[in-house]
Amino acid sequence: MPSLYLEHLTWNEAEAAFQNIPIVLVPIGAILKEHGPHLPLNTDYLLARDLARRVAEQVDVLVCPPIPFGYYPAFVNFPGSVHLAADTFRETVEQIIFSLAKNGAQKFLILNTGVSTTAPLTLAANNLISQNIPVALAHILELGRAAEEVIENKIGSHADEHETSMLLAIDESVVHMERAVAEIQPWMLERAKPVRKPGPLTRVRDAAGDYSASGIIGDPTRATREKGEAILRAMADDVVSFCKTWK
């Protein structure tokens, strides 16, 4: 049976699909989260949806609609960004997966496109596993490393060359490259990836947290569609490889 999207099915069809397709893919992607002045608030949502599509085209999975809200404390100072408490987000994910498992879904692969979401999702996965519900977690920072060489500026982690390139490959019509700016602050140069201090990004100098006037961490001006396609292809390949070997 080829891949199916749960929201397109009747309940009868979903019941049959749960029996015939072992893996339910659960994408996590913020639909309201700042990504600088050049990318839309739904950047993570678009990424989660595109990655799920690429995986579904290569291996048989049941695709759950992306979960659009989550734990994103870094971005609360930027208008339009929505953030849930860690426990609220964790419980939401647990209840969605538990509901599907109760009615026959066999095992779940969470496709996480955030970074701050990792901790609550790890706890959710462990809680579900303790109830004999098989759950695996794919983390955005661990995917697509085979394409890392296409990135010119390694100083970046948000709305940067990497992320902007992916959006150009997904839908260049939503990307405003004329608004893209390089945001390289001293704190970014001092740390290796860069890892931020606890607390939200701030648009005000000398305020608590890490300063980024634009909300960007890195240099998106180097982004290209070709780089994004290479990254997305490598990320999807990693997920597909795992799905094929997850027994």
Image: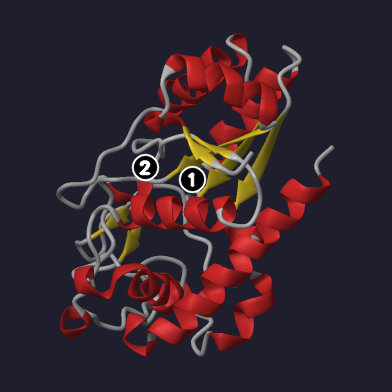
Residue 178 against residue 236 in the figure, above or below:
below
**Which one is nearer the viewer's eye here, 58 or 240?**
58
Q: Are marks 1 and 2 in contact (CB under 8 Å)?
A: yes
Q: Residue at x 30, y 50 (%)?
A: 75
- Residue count near mark 1 (Cα–Cα under 10 Å), binned few <14, some 14–19, many ≥20: some
Residue 158 against residue 103 in the figure, above or below:
below
Residue behind mark 1: 116
Q: Residue at x 61, y 51 (%)?
A: 139
Residue 47 against residue 159 in the figure, above or below:
above
Q: Residue at x 57, y 34 (%)?
A: 121
**Which one is nearer the viewer's eye here, 111 or 89?**
111
Secondary structure under badge 1?
A: loop
The percent coordinates of residue 93 (x first, y second) are 49, 25
Circle nearer the N terminus (1, 2): 2
Q: Amino acid at mark 1?
A: Ser
Q: Quadrant of residue 149?
A: bottom right
Residue behind mark 2: 73
